[in-house]
């Protein structure tokens, strides 16, 4: 990436200034853009596969549209509290809590362990995007 290869970036940019080497600069930028696109596509493919895997695992726990919606929500908000899901998905607090507990037991999501104001994490997704 451009950030990781800062020395080369500035060298190529300086070549434009000192030797009018626009072709070298354009090739360098296009190559860097291509590499970044390849990395981004790979990341997106990994996220799609993870989503499919987690949906399948959740469906085995409870074949319900609410469960599907909750798993989908963890991809929009990989760090969340149940109150967010209740308000966003319009599902009762009891149902959200029951399904979240099932997902925690299956190790699909994880909790910070607090008894009040618990925060939950889709750790697998967070690991991919970090």
Image (cartoon, rainbow, N blue to C red):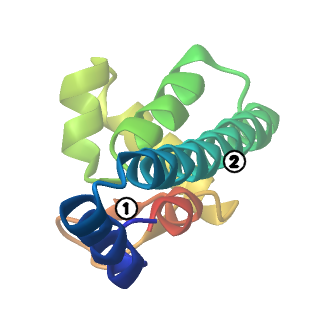
Q: Quadrant of residue 111?
A: bottom left
Q: Quadrant of residue 57?
A: top right
Position in image of residue 103 (x %, y %): 59, 52
Does any portion of residue 107 appear in the rendered image?
yes
Of pointers 1 and 2, the one earlier in the residue sequence: 2
Position in image of residue 92 (x %, y %): 31, 26
| Inter-mark Cα distance, 1 to 2 | 21 Å
Tell me which residue sits at (41%, 77%) in the image: 8
Q: Residues within 10 Å of mark 2 (few under 14, many from 20)?
A: some
Does any portion of residue 113 appear in the rendered image?
no
Q: Is residue 106 left or right of residue 100?
A: right
Instruction: Give the numbered dot on residue 105.
Output: none
Tell me which residue sits at (50%, 30%) in the image: 72
Query: In this orientation, which residue lies closer to the viewer: 82 or 31?
Result: 31
Q: Quadrant of residue 61?
A: top right
Q: Is residue 54 left or right of residue 72?
A: right
Name the residue carrying label 1: 120
**Helix, strand or loop status at disc 2:** helix
**In this rendering, the label closer to the viewer, 1 or 2:** 2
Position in image of residue 84 (x %, y %): 21, 39
Tell me which residue sits at (69%, 47%) in the image: 46
Name the residue carrying label 2: 46
Tell me which residue sits at (29%, 63%) in the image: 19
Position in image of residue 6 (x %, y %): 33, 79
**Helix, strand or loop status at disc 1:** strand
């Amino acid at each position: 990436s451009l950030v990781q290869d800062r020395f080369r970036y500035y060298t190529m940019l300086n070549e434009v200034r000192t030797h009018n080497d626009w072709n070298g600069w354009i090739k360098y930028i296009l190559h860097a853009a291509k590499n970044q696109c390849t990395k981004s596509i790979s990341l997106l493919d990994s996220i799609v596969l993870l989503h499919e895997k987690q949906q399948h695992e959740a469906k085995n726990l409870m074949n319900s549209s609410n469960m599907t919606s909750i798993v989908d929500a963890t991809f929009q908000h990989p760090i969340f509290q149940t109150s967010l899901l209740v308000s966003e998905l319009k599902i009762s607090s009891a149902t959200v809590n029951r399904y979240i507990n099932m997902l925690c037991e299956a190790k699909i999501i994880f909790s910070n362990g607090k008894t009040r104001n618990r925060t939950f994490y889709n750790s697998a997704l967070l690991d991919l995007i970090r």
